[in-house]
Amino acid sequence: MIALIDIRPMGDRAVLVCGMTDPAAWSLAVKNGAVKKGSDPIVSAFTVPAAETVLVVCSSPAALAAIIPVITAIDLAIALPPATGAPVEIPVLYDGADLDEVASACGMSRADVIAAHSGATYTVAFCGFAPGFAYLRGLPAELHVPRRVTPRTSVAAGSVAVASEFAAVYPRSSPGGWNLLGTTSLTLFDPYGFDPYGFDAHGFDGSVDGKGPALLTPGDQVRFVQVDQLPPAATPPSHRVRTHADEPAFSVITAGVASTIQDAGRAGGGEIGVPPSGMVDPMLGGLMNRLVGNSPAAALIETCGGIVIRAERAVVVTSTEAIAPVHLAPGETFGIRGGGGRLWHYLAVRGGVVAAEVLGSSATDTLSGLGPEPLAVGDSFRVGADPATPLADAVPVPAVGPVVRISPGPRLDWFADDTFELLSRSTLRVAQASRVGVRLLGPQLTRVRHDELPSEGLVRGAIQVPPSGELVMMLADHPTIGGYPVVAVVHHDDVHRVAQLPTVTCTPA
């Protein structure tokens, strides 16, 4: 009997596909069948394989409609062929802080834990949580232990860990709740050191030559090798840079609040755990760019206010407070106070801000640490070549309406039957906001399923419900996968409203 495909909507530009035997293989089949036909892309689609599902993200509702027939034609039982190459070997010094605790919980000796962990062959099931963080299947059943009750606020890069049925290596220092068994000096993610052509106009594509920025990608086999002494570590890759330009066009006098460089972001990196990033409010940022003759996606400054720049040579700028091109002479200053009914503001410079690119974008990612450092006093920047397009006339900035359209999320069935009706006529208040997400206060939802959800892909605008019952909407720097059920998704064109306003009112999409 052929299994029926289970396609669940994830907003107006994505679907979550459930029920396949091998998510990594099924994801690759989608990319081969939908993204490429000969040498020409026919549908712009990105896939994010996870524990038991694959998220398929498209560039528009029309592209999503076009890819559905491709999705439904792919066999759910498709699997990756057995790996023919040698497994990736990861040297491990078994000195982890939780090694003895894991041994005790498993009723094993320290030596038995090491032997079991290093004696298995693992397969990369999916990536997420952080760029290059690979979830490895194949952990022996006797080592299946739950995550720590209290996560650590910081886990060192190179930490070898286990949790539930997975093994992993932390590619960078980050908070984490996995059990630490040891340490490796191997670099797991380097946006500069591996083949740069692994990240192209369609995002990461494991079918091209080279590995891209992640050492481990879905389908790879891995073995851990016990060593008494780790080989010297390579110079840790710097994902961020501080900008001090030669012959700058402008410099930062006051850094302001949450001020970063942003552009269109890094679409398509979800497969290896790279968040999309980019402007929180691309419509507003694009308008500022057009005022000074730039393309809508040109790099500019995003801020919550309080920033002041100084022209080091004649430049043309604008902002969400100026709403018109402003000619600055050398030494003149220009800034954004903030407020005015919105949280996020933009400052654009004719020619676009020139900042270091990481994986094809100058966007600062506050979650993963990719891109330029957040702005600081003394930073200086060049601008790109004059776009040779005329300056636009002053235009009023469109008001940010408080009504947002929402659609049912893929895990709405984890909640009571009247949940979407309740949400779609609710007013939500912002309790906390960042580039990663927005914590919302709203109705108390009744959850009917309380088991743990295996991690699955996320999109901008997805509303998760953690055990606390609060609503958390994903924003530009959101993690690529998450383990909380998505109850609803904000329409792609309305996400900026939730980001910009203190209160919004929901309505069905």
Image (cartoon, grey):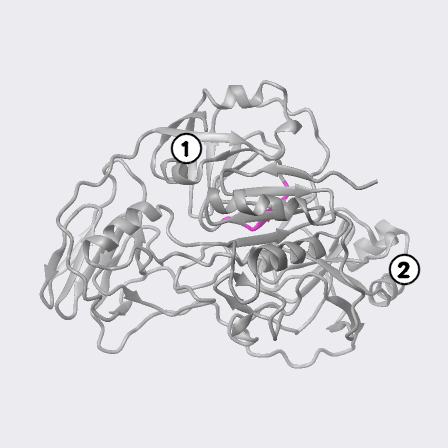
Residue 153 in view, yes or no = no
Please give the label number shown on residue 430. Answer: 1
Of tags 1 and 2, the one toward the viewer is: 1
Q: Quadrant of the N terminus?
A: top right
Query: What residue lies at 18% left-to-right and 62% top-to-bottom?
Result: 389
Q: Which residues are magenta?
A: 478-483
User: In the figure, residue 125 lies in which quadrant?
Assistant: bottom right
Residue 450: horizontal and vertical position, in percent? Answer: 70, 30
Magenta span: chief secondary structure:
loop
Give 231 or 103, whichever is nearer the viewer.
231
- What amino acid does circle 2 point to? Ser
Q: Tell me how many marks there are.
A: 2
* Residue 420 drawn at (x, y percent): 54, 23
Magenta residue check for 480 = yes
> Taking 479 as reference, is 184 above or below it?
below
Residue 480: in sight, yes or no?
A: yes
Residue 255 versus residue 8: which sits nearer the camera? 8
Lateral position of residue 300 relative to residue 150, left or right: left
Q: Residues within 10 Å of mark 2 (few under 14, many from 20)?
A: some
Instruction: Give the number of the disc on residue 109.
Output: 2
Query: Which residue sits furthest bottom?
Result: 232
Q: Is residue 78 left or right of residue 105?
A: left
For label 1, count other residues whose C-alpha is less than 10 Å away and answer few (under 14), some (14-19) or many (20+): some
The percent position of residue 129, horizontal first and vertical second, equals 60, 53
- Which residue shows up at 20% across the image and 59% down it? 293
Q: Are marks 1 and 2 in contact (CB under 8 Å)?
A: no
Question: Residue 387's image quarter?
Answer: bottom left
Given the image, on which type of amino acid does mark 1 rest? Val
Label 1 secondary element: strand
Residue 495 location in percent, x, y? 41, 39
Identify the residue at image location x=38%, y=70%.
356
Instruction: Tell me if residue 312 comes above or below residue 305 in the rendering.
Output: below
